Image: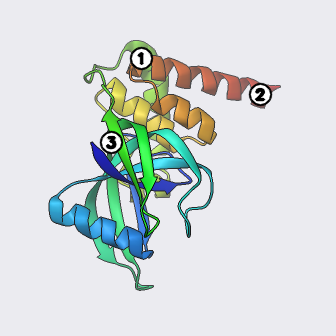
């Protein structure tokens, strides 16, 4: 399937919210087409290059579909959109069009269905509950009580200040139990460093 890409210095996860300001012609056109067709676009993390100007020279091979949930004209005159992460995908090939928009051939990745939280997830759920009180998280309408392993894993992976490499590793994991175990391990490691 062909999907226009929006390379960014961030990693979007399914079910998570991202606010963007659109000002480059290639992305204004892309957003217009997506809104008319009721389709999303792909967000991929930049590995080499910039968000603005020429197309990024290297970006991650795994990304997340961005579904437009809201839009408004910003006070500065730019178009502001709010997107929600949809399906994960793998980029099989990509081409840069004349207007510097990157168009990719993608393959959707399988996600296991939502499973109930287990007792060992209580600490991670409590952490998300605390994060929900942060004004930035509140403004995105995220955090708080989640019902399942996928939602908990995705929101924590998105909101916590892990490196780009760690976030991409988390995005690549289809099994939420594996993702939650990895998150717990990274948090335990951070705690160990702060105690030492």
Q: Quadrant of residue 192?
A: top right
Cα separation, mark 2 vs mark 3, equals: 31 Å
User: How dense is the environment of label 3, judged by Cα within 10 Å: few (below 14), some, or many (20 and up)?
Assistant: many
Cα separation, mark 1 vs mark 3, equals: 17 Å
Q: Quadrant of the C terminus?
A: top right
Disc nearer the start of the sequence (2/1) = 1
Q: Residue furthest right?
A: 196
* Image height of 68 relative to 43, above or below: below
Q: Which residue is mark 1?
A: 177
* Image height of 73 relative to 150, above or below: below
Residue 81 image offset from top left, x and y in percent: 34, 66
Tag 1's secondary structure? helix
Q: Are marks 2 and 1 in contact (CB under 8 Å)?
A: no
Image-based side of 96 in relation to 72, left or right: right
Residue 75 image offset from top left, x and y in percent: 41, 84
Image-based side of 23 in relation to 110, left or right: right
- The structure residue drawn at horizontal position 46% and vertical position 33%, both measured from the top left corner, is 171
């Amino acid at each position: 399937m062909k999907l226009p890409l929006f390379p960014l210095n961030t990693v979007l996860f399914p079910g998570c919210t991202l606010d963007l300001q659109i000002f480059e012609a290639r992305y204004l056109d892309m957003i217009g087409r997506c809104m008319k067709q009721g389709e999303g676009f792909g967000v991929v993390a930049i590995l080499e290059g910039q968000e603005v100007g020429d197309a990024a020279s290297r970006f991650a091979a795994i990304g997340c579909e961005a579904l437009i949930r809201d839009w408004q004209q910003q006070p500065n005159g730019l178009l502001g959109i709010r997107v929600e992460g949809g399906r994960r995908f793998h980029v099989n090939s990509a081409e840069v069009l004349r207007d510097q928009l990157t168009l990719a051939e993608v393959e959707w990745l399988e996600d296991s269905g939502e499973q109930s939280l287990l007792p060992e997830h209580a600490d991670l759920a409590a952490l998300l509950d605390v994060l929900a009180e942060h004004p930035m998280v509140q403004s995105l309408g995220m955090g708080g009580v989640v019902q399942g392993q996928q939602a908990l894993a995705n929101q924590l992976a998105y909101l916590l200040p892990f490196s780009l490499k760690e976030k991409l590793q988390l995005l690549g994991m289809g099994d939420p139990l594996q993702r939650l175990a990895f998150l717990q391990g990274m948090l335990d490691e951070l705690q160990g460093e702060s105690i030492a």
